[in-house]
Image: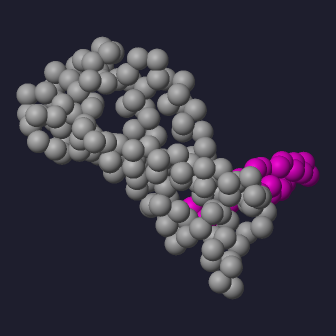
């Protein structure tokens, strides 16, 4: 029974064996995503120059340099620069990267779809922001969002037959519906 709880951390399977194939590949991809985001976040967190932290006035925030290259990035820079918004926004990247995978795994383990969706939404918004404010990052950001589909809670499709009779004419149609019993 304890082993089931361990596997549940890596599976969005809710004891419904027909909704997901739990394989070593899905487990290793989730572990790889965990490692990639931990490595990126920790590297930024331990930056010796403090470019990704709330450090002192003498350090230029990393986002100050990165977002100047697209039109949307220039607008964002103009809006946030007067009240030092980039200094406050820069560390949020670090904390999202460090916390998003553990938060998503906790959501899956507790079967809390809101936690899982919040984690996935935050990382998709992060990558969307990267794509919109930095040159030549659209494809990278899109590809970075793909493995997060493994963390999405699943739904199953059911097929039901609906019959209706109207003055000796009987019509049978097949209707596909989504099983929403797992969706809150």
Write down the quadrant of residue 135 in the picture: top left
Which colouring convention does the figure follow? Answer: one colour
Q: Residue furthest bottom?
A: 1
- Where residue 45 appears, x then y in whole percent? 32, 48
Asked if residue 47 is among those painted magenta in the image, a careful observer would answer: no
Residue 60 visible, this angle = yes
- Identify the residue at image location x=40%, y=53%: 98
Q: Residue furthest front?
A: 48
Q: Quadrant of the N terminus?
A: bottom right
Residue 113 visible, this angle = no
Q: Is residue 25 left or right of residue 63?
A: right
Which region of the structure is painted magenta?
Answer: 158-184
- Identify the residue at image location x=29%, y=45%: 92
Write down the quadrant of residue 165 in the picture: bottom right
User: Magenta: predominant secondary structure element?
Assistant: strand
- Where residue 31 appears, x then y in whole percent? 60, 55
Image position of 108 with respect to 67: above or below:
below
- Where residue 175 appears, x then y in whole percent? 77, 50
């Amino acid at each position: 029974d304890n082993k089931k709880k361990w596997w549940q951390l890596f599976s969005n399977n809710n004891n419904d064996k027909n909704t997901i194939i739990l394989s070593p590949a899905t487990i290793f991809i989730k572990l790889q995503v965990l490692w990639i985001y931990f490595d990126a976040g920790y590297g930024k967190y331990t930056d010796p120059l403090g470019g990704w932290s709330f450090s002192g006035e003498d350090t230029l925030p990393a986002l100050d340099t990165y977002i100047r290259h697209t039109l949307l990035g220039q607008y964002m820079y103009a809006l946030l620069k007067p009240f030092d918004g980039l200094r406050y926004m820069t560390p949020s990247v670090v904390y999202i990267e460090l916390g998003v995978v553990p938060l998503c795994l906790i959501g899956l383990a507790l079967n809390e779809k809101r936690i899982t969706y919040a984690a996935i939404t935050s990382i998709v918004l992060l990558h969307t922001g990267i794509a919109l404010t930095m040159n030549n990052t659209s494809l990278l950001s899109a590809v970075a969002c793909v493995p997060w589909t493994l963390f999405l809670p699943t739904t199953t499709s059911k097929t039901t037959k609906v019959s209706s009779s109207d003055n000796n004419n009987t019509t049978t149609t097949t209707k596909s519906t989504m099983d929403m019993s797992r969706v809150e």
